[in-house]
Image (cartoon, helix red, strand yellow):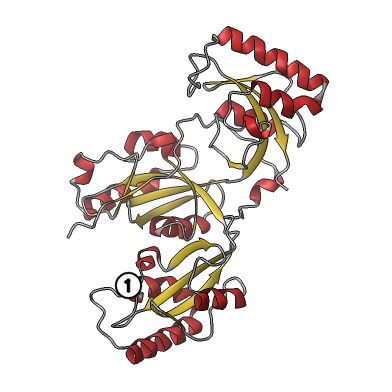
Amino acid sequence: MKARIIWVAFLWLAMSHAAWGTTPDQSDQYFPIHKTYAASHILISYFGADKRPEHVHRNKAEAKARAEELLAKVLADPSSFERIAAAESDGPSAANDGYLGGFNRGSMAPAFEKAVRKLEDGAIFHKPVKTGFGYHIVRRNSVTPKHFCARIILFTHKDIAVHLKSVAATGAHLRRSPEEAKALAEALAPKVTADNFETLVTEHSDFRAVNGRFGIFHRGKNALANTMAQAVDALPYDGVSGVVETQAGYAIIKRLKVYKRATSDILISHISAQGAPTQVTRSRAEAEALAREINQKVLADPASFEALAREHSDGIFAFRGGSQLPWFRDTKFSAYERVVETLQVGALTTEPVETPGGFFIVRRESLD
């Protein structure tokens, strides 16, 4: 039976992927999700519990006994938590291997949150936790999970459970059987190297957005991210996997580095720039001249950056003096990101950076 198609939107930006420099701090893959807690659970519901699934008919005593039985299994083998959650949990998070993601104080049932608070990251609560929804087997997760980035060569088929946004919704690729998709992937896999990966994406993959770039993800984001994270975590940087069965099809995966940067900027847009605000009427030449003038002013007086950003910037963070939220690699224009890699923290661009979005005066900031 064909699985239900779930539309998953990752952050795909059609930018070029020019070479990046490598520095020691790029090996740090752990970034906060900006929540107080994070957890996974296995929920055992019973007749009369809140939001009981229709298929559940066990009574409260049977639910407690089943929860205790499963808890003993995961305590004996903590690595089985996701597998057991997917197979046994009565909660909707079973589709995500039990991951609930992050949450803040007061947003979960009090007994559940109390149990999470008592745990260290990775620990499982010693007994089932009873709430109005049933009995929970609770594991606390890190609010600073390991993030991953990868490219994929993907062969989809008619029975996929997850349909990536940039894969055509119709076509021969969705008439293949799973066996045909797997055979195509296995035939190509021996030919794939780190050096020819992007070329083979364009020649063979059903997913070609940004040269097959899968985006930034971590365990717990969704079931596909869980599968990808497990495969990518086993690879070195620039390492290439064999054929991996995923919810989106059969994939060959190349691991990429992932890291964050922080910047402030002043954007001078023009009428032909991407995303130009409606009030912008200046020409490209006028925008360049203004950007150069402002760049010279901030170089002469760096303390004026915030005031000039508020006065002149066409960017959405002008009201913050140009201060951007921390961003992941490959989420800005490529020219912008290349320049940032040349700057020390606190340093300014010596001339405006031209991008499809306009001209930027950029200052690199600390992530601290």
Quadrant holding the N terminus: bottom left
Q: Give neighbour class at mark 1: few <14, some 14-19, many 20+ (Cα, 10 Å).
A: some
Residue 137: give x, y in percent of width and height. 46, 79
Residue 279: give x, y in percent of width and height. 51, 17
Instruction: Determine whether 280 is above or below 62 in the image.
Output: above
Q: Could you say which quadrant of the image residue 97 lies in?
A: bottom left
- The residue lying toward the viewer, choosing from 7 and 169, is 7
Q: Is residue 326 left or right of residue 244?
A: right
Residue 261: give x, y in percent of width and height. 65, 41
- The residue lying toward the viewer, choosing from 53 and 342, is 53
Instruction: Determine whether 319 is above or below 358 in the image.
Output: below
Residue 316: give x, y in percent of width and height. 57, 31
Q: Could you say which quadrant of the image residue 71 lies in?
A: bottom left
Q: Which residue is mark 1?
A: 51
Total marks shown come to 1
Q: Which residue lies at the image location 60% right of the left edge and 70% below the top edge?
A: 121
Q: Which residue lies at the image location 57% right of the left edge and 72% below the top edge?
A: 122
Which amino acid lies under the numbered mark 1 shown in the image of this protein? Lys
SS at circle 1 = loop
Q: Which residue lies at the image location 56% right of the left edge and 77% below the top edge?
A: 114
Q: Is residue 271 left or right of residue 335?
A: left
Instruction: Determine whether 152 is above or below 230 in the image.
Output: above
